[in-house]
Amino acid sequence: MNEILSQIFQVGFFAAVIRIATPLVFGTLGELFAERAGILNLGIEGIMMLAAMSGFSTVFFTGSLWLGVLAAVLTGVVAGLVMGLLTVSLGLSQHVSGIGLTLLCSGLSFYCYRLIFGQPSTLPAIKPFETVALPVLAEIPIIGPILFNQFALVYLAMLIVPAAAFVLFHTPWGLNLRTVGENPLAAFSAGVSVTAMRYQALLLSGALMGLAGAFLCMAQYNAYTFGVISGRGWVCIALIVFGQWNPWKSAAGAILFACIDALQLRLQASSAINLPYQVFLMLPFVLTIVGMALVSRNALAPAALLKPFRKEAR
Amino acid sequence: MENPSLLEMRGISKRFGHVRANDGVDLTLNGGDILGLLGENGAGKTTLMNILFGVYTPDSGRIAIAGRPVHIRSSSDALAHGVGMVHQHFHLVARHTVLENLMVGQSGRGIRLDRNFILQRMQDIEQRFGLHLVPGARVSDLTIGEQQRLEIVKALIRGARILILDEPTAALTPQETEGLFTALRAMASQSMGVVFISHKLHEVMAITQRVVILQQGKVAAEVLNDGTISQRRLAELMCGQEISPPSKSSAKPGAVRLRMENLRTPGGARPSLKGVCLKIRGGEILGIAGVSGNGQSELADVIAGMLPPAGGILEINGKPVPRYTPRSMQALGVGRIPEDRMGTGLIPALPLSSCMVLSRIQEFRFSRCGFLKHAAIRRFADQQIESFGIKAAGHQVRTGTLSGGNLQKALLARELAWNPTLLLAAQPTRGLDVAATRFVHQRFLELRDRDCAIVLISEDLEELFALSDRIAVMYEGRIMDILDIQTATVANVGLLMAGVGGSK
């Protein structure tokens, strides 16, 4: 048993946790901005998938990873715009619009992938991001290799969490956004455009989801497969409830989930425990449900979540 | 040339569908004015003020502020022109602090939220108008009066020179109302303009200098409140007809309809009844007075069959209640006008015809073997709509589109259709205008004279004194005392409401 533990809890394990957590952090923060403005963006799973596809294809043909990231982000923004048209301008059901958007985006990504790559016998691959060791910081024992010998996008995720918390809680824009999500009428009567705020939140939300997709097929893997997202979008939605709509707590949730995910990967690889591998695959999701049940008992969703806003409604 | 007035609205018109909410309304407001805006529900007061605040755009008409023509397309336009509004239902974020609520919509002052700027303005406003608030308090912890103060401060912080208050005293205690009036007078003395919308005529008389009365979207009258006009006259101008207080014959009490002996309910989240003793006879109205939260809602829920008692005796028409469900109470002859018209009483999403038969749908005349008899339901609804004078475009309209007065008429129409022997009415005229209130009162008195027993729970003492034959005062889950209407005085009841004196 000791042997297994020492095998698992190595520097490499924690570095992997950070890597697994990164797309979840992007996705979670993206969803968080949307929900704080009162829109449940269930398009997340599909948006991540479509962004991964467009980003990957861009890199495949241009050879530029950063151009690929840009393409993924733009894809997310456009998808966010569609979500805005459906739920903000038309005021349709957010559940139906979101699930519809996920179906549309995932279908579209498979379709485009086939159009572009056909059915190749070997999986098209790109040269993915390489880790960048930050000078000085990477030299710190233990913490250095875990945190500061990572992909550029991981560093971006580390910066985005405090940035998101700052924007939400310490800027006028963030306060307006939260007010729109709690009581749109209060925002409206204070002269804030509910429509504009919700669109901005959705565009930002899409951009962050695009980053998540880009990371998965350009850093974590070097190829696009149909299972590239495999439920990570849905996990992000759970993580927000777990994190009580707070960027720090949601990011902590992402790391916790990543821990369990990394652990099950190691357990699968280790020959010490003889169980079907599906059991290990299940583990992070089972624990997500348990965690949610424990933590989200007194979760307080934004009061206007799921509620469309119409100015002249009587 | 004389100074232009602070606000001039000329020929304002606005239609919703085929309803003319405002029809060529003129309104002038000078600095230092407190203007009363009166009218029945649906007379167009709120529409007019929402136009001024940029919520609606008028179909025609001009607005000038301090002599300059303005176009107000949104509430930010209104705020920029110095127009602030305190809505009847507050526009506050309950989960945010006072300070956060005041900072919403502040822009152009750097990337960080500027707390100090707002704190300074708050202090300034407190000094000028005596409006005190604790910046760090959560709105959900504030009383209604404090929340209203926050709404006013919010408008003032944005530089409002014209303040619109829509039904500001509806939920305030007398002391809070007095505080509000002091602040309003301070504003007027600093040459701001205040528009005061209210149903409560005595308050309009107390605070305003001039009163504009709207009727069906038009200005029906404009009068100076110089002490020569009476409340009665204002009410008549508002309704366009003479108002006489409901005439009440002396009570002829009959058989005992409801008897409660030492009735108790379980405690917990709600206040509990701690041994209530009551007896009500047919042909009398028993008023229940009390500060809200002293067990009146629980008493109502017990009689309605929604809250099973924990102990004690409850008899209806001399027989103990077999089961505590709303349906069995109904079967015993209990009719009910619940406090919460739109939740417990009627279902806003359903057509009016369905709401009118909801509680009686199991009856043979409305359904057979689980199938609805649509024709019979429609006929019944049409008949009730007509005999109760419910203003609705037909029995098929969504119930939620009706005005408060018409909702209450619909409820009455449903509950009175089957001649209950005991009627339970909780806050039956809350939010209703003069004419609708009169209608409800008239019906109650008719019902009483037909030997029905009525339990009237109300926070409106004027109403209790006008209708009741006896008044029971509740305090902390007990009946403090039951007073005969001939000997009861407001001061007397007020003391009992505060828990002073009484026979228990």
Image: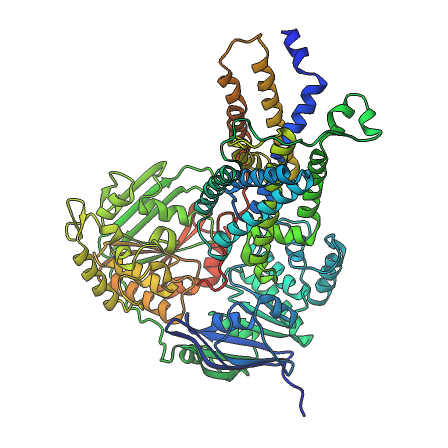
Image spot of residue A207 (x, y percent) = 61, 45
Image spot of residue B267 (x, y percent) = 44, 38
Residue shown at 30%/57% (left/top)? B351
Q: Is residue B111 above or below residue A153?
A: below
Q: Is residue B260 left or right of residue A275?
A: left
In depth, the one of A114 and A265 nearer the eye is A114
Please, which residue is most extreme toward the right here?
A136
Image spot of residue A291 (x, y percent) = 55, 27
In depth, the one of A251 and A208 nearer the eye is A208
| Residue B368 seen in this snapshot | yes
Image spot of residue B431 (x, y percent) = 43, 63
Q: Is residue A287 above or below residue A159?
A: above
In depth, the one of A59 and B273 nearer the eye is A59
Quadrant of the image containing the N terminus of chain B: bottom right
Residue shown at 61%/51% (left/top)? A177
What colour scheme governs how the chains and residues are painted in the rendered image of this protein? rainbow
| Residue B91 seen in this snapshot | no
